[in-house]
Amino acid sequence: MTDPPTPALQLMADQDGERLDQFLARRLDGASRTQARQLIDDGLVRIDGSLERPAYKLRFGELVAVYPRASSPVEAPVGIELAVVYEDDDLAVIDKPANLTVHPAPGETQPTLVSAILHRWPEVSKISNDDQDADPLRPGLVHRLDRDTTGLLMIAKNAPTLRSLRDQLRERSMDKRYLAVVVGAPDPPAGLIDAPIGRDPADPRRMAILDRARPSQTSYETVERFADAALLECRLITGRTHQIRVHLSAIGHPIAGDSMYGLPTPLIERQALHSARLTLRHPATEASLTLEADPPADFRSVLAHLREGDLLLGDQPPPRAQRGSTDSVNRRSRSPKRGRRRRTHRIR
């Protein structure tokens, strides 16, 4: 087959002897090993320009290029209705619904948010021509939300805006607040979870707390307590994949309905996580911009049931904090008013 002229993604092998399919499953966000093998079998992966088998053993420093499919319906513009919270000539912010994947991924068969973005703002497709660091498969996307996480998501309409918003994320000057309904009530009620996150070596679809992974920090504050649950406001200090879900699960308070890191609940069919508030510096005017989005109906329904005294888990036993021989979690408790550190908990 003839490959597209430009790879969608280029990755450097970071260790010797790892199978090609294992490497791709580890490095491609949301991809399973089966999906990685399918990409290889379809001729969409090359090692230093050559086709190889899924079992090929990589050598440190080899360049792995992943090519997009010649025609993919998930990357074509599709007229999906979007709830736009804010828009000007440079920037748009939408309120993403649940059950919508943000960008194309191996194995994804439904139209994604990228399809909707290309339909509504076709100019974003040209951003990669002006910014060599922009991903042509994720046009205009500054960050992402999980498929079933709802709320505020930024879209850059041009390259300068994309660079500015990326810089704000990297410098941690952007303030992103999430609402989460969790199992039980954290003690202390407010604090900082400081634990490195990386790809779970036992399951590449999941993330895990690992000693040598990327530094990750999430602050939380209890907004409301219920019989066996709590409503938290979480602030992302870093922005790792599944960060809030992994951190809250690690301290024994997983998000309600999170099938991957927690327990199911009859009150909601997805993780009760919502991106509720966003404060940024406008890339063009330099003015501070704060945007908010109310939680959707299913999230509000959970809160209504809990306020009436219903139990989140029913007869299920509450989860325990994740523990592992190589995992650690620092939890710094602090007063929500003074921000004063009280003590540090380490879970091993």
Image (cartoon, helix red, strand yellow):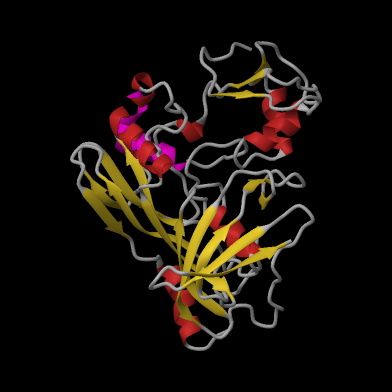
Kindly identify the residue that appears in the image at 52 percent across and 51 percent down.
Answer: 147
From the top left corner, tell me how far across and down residue 182 is, in percent.
55, 71
Quadrant in the picture for residue 264: bottom right
- In the rendered image, residue 293 lying in the magenta stretch gets the answer no
In the depicted structure, whether residue 220 falls above or below residue 31? below
Quadrant in the picture for residue 282: top left
Q: How many marks?
A: 0
Kindly identify the residue that appears in the image at 59 percent across and 82 percent down.
Answer: 228
Q: Nearer the viewer, residue 209 or 44?
A: 209
Q: Nearer the viewer, residue 333 or 323?
A: 333
- In the rendered image, residue 118 lying in the magenta stretch gets the answer yes
From the top left corner, tell me how far across and down residue 86 is, in percent.
25, 50
In the depicted structure, whether residue 106 falls above or below residue 291? above
Kindly identify the residue that appears in the image at 37 percent across and 37 percent down.
Answer: 167
Q: Is residue 258 visible?
A: no
- Decide if residue 323 is on the left or right side of residue 82: right
Q: Is residue 107 visible?
A: yes
Which quarter of the figure is the N terminus placed in?
A: top right
Span highlighted in magenta in the image: 112-126
- Decide if residue 203 is on the left or right side of residue 66: right
